[in-house]
Image (cartoon, rainbow, N blue to C red):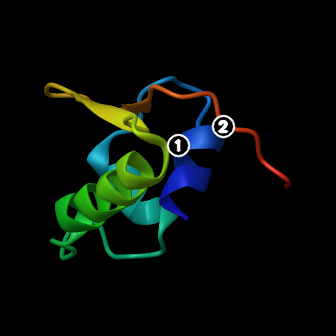
Amino acid sequence: MLIKTLIFNEARICSKQELILGIDKDADNYRGLEMCLSRLQSKFKNAFGERLFRSVRNRGYCLVQEVKSAY
């Protein structure tokens, strides 16, 4: 769901709040986003040797790889 949120975001950068809402969590109370992103990043890096996304200071996250969706 995180990748899908990053792919379908009109702006290039997704804020933390947008990502949390994209995984159907309460943006005011959810604290696990960074852990989920870290795990996703390490799985992608182990599989392909590259990062999938990067953090943008004070703004959020953006994809650094081209991802094609089947949806």
| Mark 2 nearby-residue class (10 Å; few <14, some 14–19, many ≥20) | few
Residue 45 visible at all: yes
Q: What is the x, y in percent for residue 12?
A: 50, 23
Q: Which mark is residue 67?
A: 2
Residue type beneath disc 1 = Leu
**Secondary element at image label 1:** helix
**Secondary element at image label 2:** loop
Residue type beneath disc 2 = Val
Which of the pair 12/36 is nearer the observer? Answer: 36
- At 75% from the left edge and 39% from the top edge, which residue is drawn? 68
Q: Is residue 65 left or right of residue 41?
A: right
- At 19% from the left edge and 66% from the top edge, which residue is drawn? 35
Q: Is residue 52 above or below residue 12?
A: below
Q: Is residue 11 above or below residue 15?
A: above
- At 43% from the left edge and 51% from the top edge, which residue is drawn? 44
Q: What is the x, y in percent for residue 17?
A: 32, 52
Q: What is the x, y in percent for residue 31?
A: 15, 71
Which of the pair 11/44 is nearer the observer? Answer: 44
Q: Which mark is residue 6?
A: 1
